[in-house]
Amino acid sequence: MKQILYSRSRIIEALIHIIGWGIVFGFPFLMMTRSGFTITWVEYLRHGSVVPLSFFIVFYVNYCYLIPHYLFEGRINRYLLLNVLLIICVTAGVHFWQEYAFQNFIKGSGNSRRHMGPPKWIFILRDAFTMILTVGLSVAIRLSGRWIQVEAARREAEKSRTEAELKNLRNQLNPHFLLNTLNNIYALIAFDTDKAQSAVQELSRLLRHVLYDNQQTFVALGKEMDFIRNYIELMRIRLASNVTVETHFEVRPDSRTEIAPLIFISLIENAFKHGISSTEPSFIRIRFSESHEEVRCEIINSYHPKSETDKSGSGIGLEQVRKRLELTYPERYEWEHGVSENGKEYKSTLCIRY
């Protein structure tokens, strides 16, 4: 794909050069008037093409050789000196050619009278100044092309860096997710082996999603919701009777809206980690909704913070969510989360705009 885009840009660049120089070389023909003024090819090749040809030479000597080999390499003094010599040589060549062509024109017309007009040095300065402008034009075009290449390379490097960071975060998330799930299954084995076996089966289904779909940049929202439902059911297995879990999914089962995989799972993990108490009544409310412009995840749970001696979680989940949101949805998300004023509830609301 990159090669195709590069080839297209080179073709467009070549067309711009051809059209531009076609206008410059064809300008004498555009000066014809209704009074019958015409210019023959002989006259054009003898007089009208010399100055455009000099501009052409100065432009492409700079464009193809001097700028990339001297200016871009930082040898500015050498670049300026070579341009001075180039302009002097080309201006002198144009001047001598015009003198030669004009003398032949006088002889051919049979008019031996001296032609009166402005001094020759005025025309020489005019041509030299125009060639300096031509040099400036070639530098401007070459620099703009180089800037475009550098900017494209920078964007490609930024994209690669972002993809590498996202891949690194996903690789961190897999063991983090697996560790939390295994902790739940371990707790089940001690008092209910049948539920533990069921949990292992649920885990195998979840791992298929983690191992395969998590390697993609985006997955279908409907598929991600299925994964979240299965995960919540797995979490329900170990819950006591004093815990209430409510879920509301206002998302079409066949929704093809693209979403970053596992972007919500750390929020749900956090709710189960801090929203459940073995001694006090607890609740978790999870709601997902989809509109034509955003996906919304709202989680409210009772707040029972773990003690410092509890090592059931490393605390990297929410930090991963923040980093992934910044990398995947820059300036396209809103995330509000925190403990209520009375310290009894924790609320997390995440809105991702398309």
Image (cartoon, helix red, strand yellow):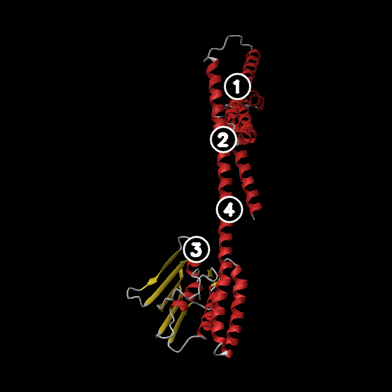
- Residue identified by numbered label 3: 323
* Label ID, residue 157: 4
Q: Secondary structure at mark 1?
A: helix
- Measuring 64% from the left and 21% from the top, which residue is drawn there? 93
- Going by the numbered disc 2, the residue's amino acid type is Val
Quadrant location of the N terminus in the rendered image: bottom right
- Residue identified by numbered label 2: 139
Q: Are marks 3 and 2 in contact (CB under 8 Å)?
A: no
- Going by the numbered disc 3, the residue's amino acid type is Lys
* Label ID, residue 88: 1
From this view, report whether residue 100 is shown above or below residue 315.
above
Measure the C-alpha gap from mark 1 to mark 3.
Answer: 60 Å
Q: Closer to the camera: disc 3 or disc 4? A: 3
Q: Secondary structure at mark 3?
A: helix
Q: Secondary structure at mark 4?
A: helix
**Where does residue 216 sit, x and y in percent of width and height?**
60, 67
**Where does residue 99 sit, x and y in percent of width and height?**
62, 16
- Going by the numbered disc 4, the residue's amino acid type is Ala
From this view, report whether residue 310 is shown above or below residue 352.
below
Q: Nearer the viewer, residue 107 or 227?
A: 227
Residue 113 location, quadrant? top right
Residue 184 location, quadrant? bottom right
- Specify which label sits upstream in the sequence, 3 or 4: 4
Q: Are marks 2 and 1 in contact (CB under 8 Å)?
A: no
